[in-house]
Image (cartoon, rainbow, N blue to C red):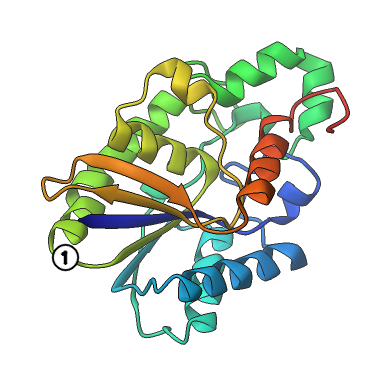
């Protein structure tokens, strides 16, 4: 049985303010640092060790990986960073508070921009914006040429990515439908273990940690653009 561990970076400064981060290179919050440390402890408690770690080129991904490796006394582990694992570019929404964006553009429109496969927000001033389809297209070659290659070489692999680069990876790995993808929400700094057969076909997955707390975190992610008060 082959495996892969996926972790979204710890809470960033813009996560803390419930704002769109995208390609903005923001740092971790104090809570985000603590989340990364806790994720490392969970990995240790469940006997997960790694030969290689893949990150984006954004500091919240790289710092989360470094914190986890240091906590696990594993700073020697090889790290590979690629722009292909960057968060989705959110266009004009980058830096905007999600509830304020819902008021301006409508809650359903924000949900579609955030969670649908092919829709993308209006472009930023530099002319950039991505749909999840765009992210999947750029992530796929990195999965095939780097991550999958490492797994097939029997390396223990950790990916410290972002909400949408990890959603794109899961879409590729699990062959998700657009509707399944729409409802997929990934909490910060929560290790997700993916299991494969020997042909690298998806078999199963599970989060490490308190399952009730994880369900609450997933619900909070789903409600980030909602104008209703989270329960």
Q: Is residue 29 visible in this depiction of the protein?
A: no
x 22%, y 56%: residue: 2
Residue drawn at (21%, 67%), measured in percent from left and top?
Answer: 155
Which residue does the image show at 11% across and 45% down from the upper left? Answer: 199
10 Å crowding of disc 1: few (<14), some (14-19), many (20+): few
Question: Residue 191: where, in percent of width, then height?
Answer: 50, 57
| Residue closer to the observer: 188 or 3 | 3
Q: Is residue 30 above or below residue 199?
A: below
User: In what quadrant of the picture does the N terminus appear?
Assistant: bottom left
**Residue 102 at x, y = what percent?**
78, 20
Where in the figure is residue 161, as x and y percent of width and height?
47, 52
Instruction: Report how many numbered discs are placed on residues in the image.
Output: 1
Is 55 on the left or on the right of 142, as rendered? right
The quadrant of the picture occupied by the C terminus is: top right
Return the residue at label 1.
Answer: 154
Asked whether 170 or 87 is in front, the reply is 170
User: Is 25 on the left or on the right of 107, as rendered?
Assistant: left
């Amino acid at each position: 049985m082959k495996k892969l561990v996926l972790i979204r970076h710890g809470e960033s400064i813009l996560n803390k303010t419930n704002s769109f981060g995208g390609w903005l290179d923001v740092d971790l919050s104090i809570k985000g640092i603590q989340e990364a440390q806790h994720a490392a402890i969970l990995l240790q408690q469940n006997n997960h060790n790694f030969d290689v770690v893949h990150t984006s080129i954004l500091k919240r991904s790289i710092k989360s990986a470094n914190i986890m490796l240091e906590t696990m006394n594993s700073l020697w582990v090889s790290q590979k960073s690629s722009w292909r694992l960057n968060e989705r570019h959110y266009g004009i929404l980058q830096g905007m508070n999600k509830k304020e964006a819902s008021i301006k553009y409508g809650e359903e429109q924000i949900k579609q921009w955030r969670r649908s496969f092919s829709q993308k927000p209006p472009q930023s001033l530099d002319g950039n914006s991505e749909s999840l389809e765009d992210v999947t297209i750029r992530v796929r070659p990195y999965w095939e040429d780097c991550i999958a290659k490492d797994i097939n070489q029997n390396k223990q692999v950790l990916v410290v990515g972002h909400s949408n680069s990890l959603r794109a990876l899961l879409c590729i790995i699990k062959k998700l439908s657009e509707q399944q993808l729409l409802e997929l929400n990934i909490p910060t700094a929560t290790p997700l273990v993916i299991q494969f057969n020997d042909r690298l076909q998806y078999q199963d997955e599970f989060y490490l940690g308190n399952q009730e707390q994880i369900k609450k975190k997933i619900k909070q992610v789903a409600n980030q653009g909602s104008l209703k008060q989270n329960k």
